[in-house]
Image (cartoon, helix red, strand yellow):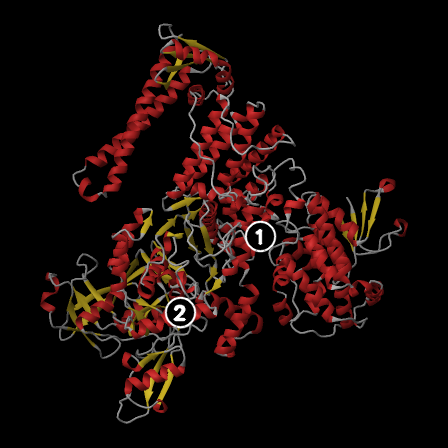
Amino acid sequence: MATLYVSPHPDDFRSLLALIAAEFCPSSRPKALTEDPPASLNARSRPTLVLGAGEGESVLSGSSAVSWYLALQGKRAGVDTKQQSQVWQWLSFADNELTPVSSAVVFPLMGMMGSSRAEMMRVLKVLDQALEPRTFLVGESITLADMAVATAVLLPFKYVLEPPDRTVLTNVTRWFLTCINQPQFLKVLGKVTLCEKMVPVAPKTIAAQLKKEAKKKEKLEKFQQKKEMELQLLMSTLFSLSPLVSDVISPLPDSYSPQYVEAAWYPWWEKQGFFKPEYGRKNISDPNPRGMFMMCIPPPNVTGSLHLGHALTNAIQDTLTRWHRMRGETTLWNPGCDHAGIATQVVVEKKLMRERGMSRHDLGRENFIQEVWKWKNEKGDRIYHQLKKLGSSLDWDRACFTMDTKLSYAVQEAFIRMHDEGVIYRSKRLVNWSCSLNSAISDIEVDKKELTGRTLLPVPGYKEKVEFGVLVSFAYKVDGSDEEVIVATTRIETMLGDSAVAVHPTDSRYQHLKGKMVLHPFCDRKMPIVFDDFVDMSFGTGAVKITPAHDHNDYEVGERHNLAFINILDENGLLINVPPPFLGMKRFEARKAVLQALKDRGQFKEIKDNPMVVPVCSRSKDIVEPLMKPQWYVSCADMGKQAADSVREGRLKIIPDHHLKTWFNWMDNIRDWCISRQLWWGHRIPAYFVTVNDPSVKPGEDMDGHYWVSGSTEEEAREKAAKRFSVSTDKITLRQDEDVLDTWFSSGIFPFSIFGWPNEDLNVFYPGTLLETGHDILFFWVARMVMMGLKLTGKLPFKEVYLHAVVRDAHGRKMSKSLGNVIDPLDVITGISLEGLYAQLTDSNLDPIEVEKAKQGQKSDYPNGIPECGTDALRFALCAYTSQGRDINLDVNRILGYRHFCNKLWNAVKFAMKTLGDNFVPSEKLCGEESVSDRWILSRLSAAVGLCDTAFKAYDFPAITTAIYNFWLYELCDVYLVRRQALVCRQTLYTCLEVGLRLLSPLMPFVSEELYQRLPRRRPQSDPPSITSNEGCWKEKLTEKSYFFYKITIRSLRADYNLTKTRADCYLQCIDSATASLVHKYSLQIQTLSYSQAIIPLTDNQPVPEGCAVAIASDRCTVNLMLKGLIDVEKEVAKLMTKKGDLEKQMEKLREKMAKGDYKEKVPVKVQEQDAEKLRQSQTELEKVKEAMDNFRKMM
């Protein structure tokens, strides 16, 4: 075992670098000793690495030499020569640029030499600029470059860089935190505490050693005098954005590496402006005869990090965007980010409490909002960096944030216009209330937790878990009699707010109680027995307690019968308006107290398990309470009708159409939309309550809309109020609403607010072409965009809506942290060990029991971790999965399969380029004298182009991936590349490579660009510089040659009978001598391509030997494949018998379903059509099975 001698000092960054590098060598990690190396080794300094033992030992001394050796062992020194050179340059940068300035600033704090802090910030700002477009310094994972530079800046981050400095160095800070939170860094460094305020550090006991280091640094002061230009030159060398010079000239590496391919292309694409609609156009406003494509991104939350839902969304959207761009259309995919009101406020509040022990109320509203902006500026662009990792070709110069000045003005203007028109109004109604957040939340932020019976759930603010999933029955005494009415509830504490008991009007059990009252057991309240159709007579006793202020159904009953609305909960979940001893109790403590009090009074009847759904706040995990609050609402009836009609009339198309039923159900039964949120972070509602200081005007109440005005400024609102009440402005006092708008309000106007509405012309990019998103936000976002677009601009915001499926795991389960099946796409791209997955769980907010459960799930699904698949393979897999259904069961092994497909592509192009030769010059068009095989492959290419074009227009992504996969693998590689010919063949081969890569480019942009750049150009002076901007695909229609049909038919037969390696004789029975002559002419080609032992042409009157499987190749030829003696006939018959039985059972079950009397009335027409098609397919398959069995029996 090797021995590593290091310094014991916790701040000796040179030894720390060696220790961290050693952690990346799990199989060959050296033994670390904190002592001086033996004098016999002649080692001059620590760290020192001793390899071997005895006379054969070798010694490496010094931080650079030791860490380089260890990084090579741990495969962290770069994947190829280019990356290794970059890593070495970063080592030099750390040693010669960062270490001198870092030490010079930190050491004075330890009582040593001093230097310029500004010099250190200058160097770090250059590093910050270099890190802007990337996660790591070299490639897509941690290398020695990151280790060296991170340890070089460790001391400044610990002792010098205060929070304002870190705000300036956003990218360096993000990268540094990423590094030090890697398991290997954590093991060596522990938890690093960042500097809050720079103060002198007491000298350590081994200060002499540090002084020695300081003297060494003094000798390097000349490096501090280097000019900015020299440093910038070094950085530009490290991050050259022109891979066409450095990468493409060198030969293709032997095998495909995602890290190698995906490292440099994105910055180059971005720098060249390929993603901008202005690229290649003189004036963006001029009509483009090829059309316009505009799509805005569903803005991800600023708090968000990449998950598979994002990956799916962006794989589909980027594929579509690149396809439209390659068609020559003016193309814009507009990025943006949502301020995510509740989510962001929760994150910052937790951070404040954790770091400073303060709540937002301690800071005050203005200071808290400044803290949120500070957090946003530090962390908020993380999602953008991750989107770039996915290859998303967004126009980043147009990126918008929903709290930007431009978008905030649009939000304000939208509210004012709709309020002035009366579409926005104020009302007191039930809302979803989170006591933890002290805010109303939208329906989409409520998780519906299904319980099968009694369950104890954790609730924020309660030490013990709370009981749910039970039904409590108790009795109300009827006033003036000995009778009682028994009711049941799952929320027994709400009986304190009951104001009636309801029964069904036709229920004979209660007819004699009309006009009667029941008595509340804990106060002197008398409550009417009301008769209402909503009651289910068959449930329980048929009598229902009514709590209008705390239940949505009861609210409507209360409205119909003019009942008292008694609010028993305040905003914190404490009981109000109730008698002692319940007054002031927490709601779930009152649950126990009320139950006990009912028992004491003898009015408790029973408690039993009850399946139910519990509403849980997705942000705070609190139990959601229906609560009466005055809020702002949007009247949606008219807007909903317009949105529904736009789809009915065909002006807006929703794809797939099975979502239409949901759309119409929502739009035709739409409720008014609550847009108030009791938060500080967000767009504050521009509405003001008016107090008129004039005795002639009576004071207003909060719920009276006449006393509310809206305005973009307080002055504007004051003018409106003065005009409304016919008084001078000096008599008006205004109070602005404290609440902010629902985040979905700003998202609803996103398609036009990003273009400067209402101040700027929308004609160029609005309306958009397409909206692509998940079907789960069809109502919450899509419907609101349609409604608000029509309302505020008079136009639909887009022409089509494509809704993709929900991603689930390989077992069809919903992605859940507690199941351990949540996959970070970056882990799929770069790979991660099982230990790495465990570490992510440890860092999560799951409780220990859930962590262990999740670990078991991860161990089961990923026993060896997740292998490196790369971005291209992930994108291709996601698109291949995206059939137009509701769910995607994503298997990581299938993604790995497409990683192997990339390798096959790589090898195919490398092989083909050898065939083309170094001096090959492609001709501008084909010569017209191509061979049969040339014409066949060109026809297959043409068919693939046609299939892709049709499928793109139909959003049929599996058809696209299948067409491309089949062409490259089964036609170009398996057939055509085995038949190399002379010059004409090379021209055909070039055409296949060029067009095939262009077909692939929208889905796999990185590998297609890498390979495309290796090809010569047809027109070097005029061809576009990148495949991303290359227009069109070769589409000439060519005729299939029939001998290839014979090849396909034979190979299909071989597959049917599992003849993977065995070659069989093949008899081609031809109907006439001309066909037989053609078969004879191409028999060698057919034999080679179909893997046959021999090809024997037969005329129609020649007998076919017994023991053959038969298939029709064309109307002029039948294929007969000799199977006798090659397969186990009895075994095959037994397999077919089993299959026959299964098919017959399936068909019988389907026929029984279809034969039911109410089948045609109750089952949707679409399902009936699907059932009929299943039956037809099963019948066809059964006939084939019977035919195969007959053929086998002839051989027995």
Q: Nearer the viewer, residue 791 or 1032?
A: 1032
Answer whether labels 2 and 1 touch (C-beta < 8 Å).
no
Q: Residues within 10 Å of mark 1 (few under 14, many from 20)?
A: some
Circle 1: element type: helix
Quadrant placement of the C terminus? top left
Q: Residues within 10 Å of mark 2 (few under 14, many from 20)?
A: many
How far apart marks 2 and 1 lie (CA) works out to: 34 Å
Q: Nearer the viewer, residue 300 or 701?
A: 300
Task: Kindly indicate the quadrant of the structure image that contains residue 146.
Answer: bottom right
The residue under the point 57% across, 66% down is 378
The residue under the point 63% across, 44% down is 260
Residue occupied by mark 2: 411
Q: Is residue 499 above or below residue 186?
A: below
Question: Closer to the N terminus: mark 2 or mark 1?
Answer: 1
Q: Is residue 949 left or right of residue 1147?
A: right
The residue at the far top in this view is 1102
Q: Locate residue 1176, reporting x and y percent.
A: 27, 30
Q: Amino acid at mark 2?
A: Val
Residue occupied by mark 1: 272
Disc on res. 30: none
The residue under the point 37% across, 50% down is 803
Q: Is residue 181 visible?
A: yes
Q: Is residue 844 above or below residue 167?
A: above
Q: Is residue 1107 visible?
A: no
Q: Locate residue 116, reporting x and y percent.
A: 76, 71
Q: Amino acid at mark 1?
A: Gln
Q: Nearer the viewer, residue 929 or 58?
A: 929
Q: Is residue 1017 left or right of residue 478?
A: right
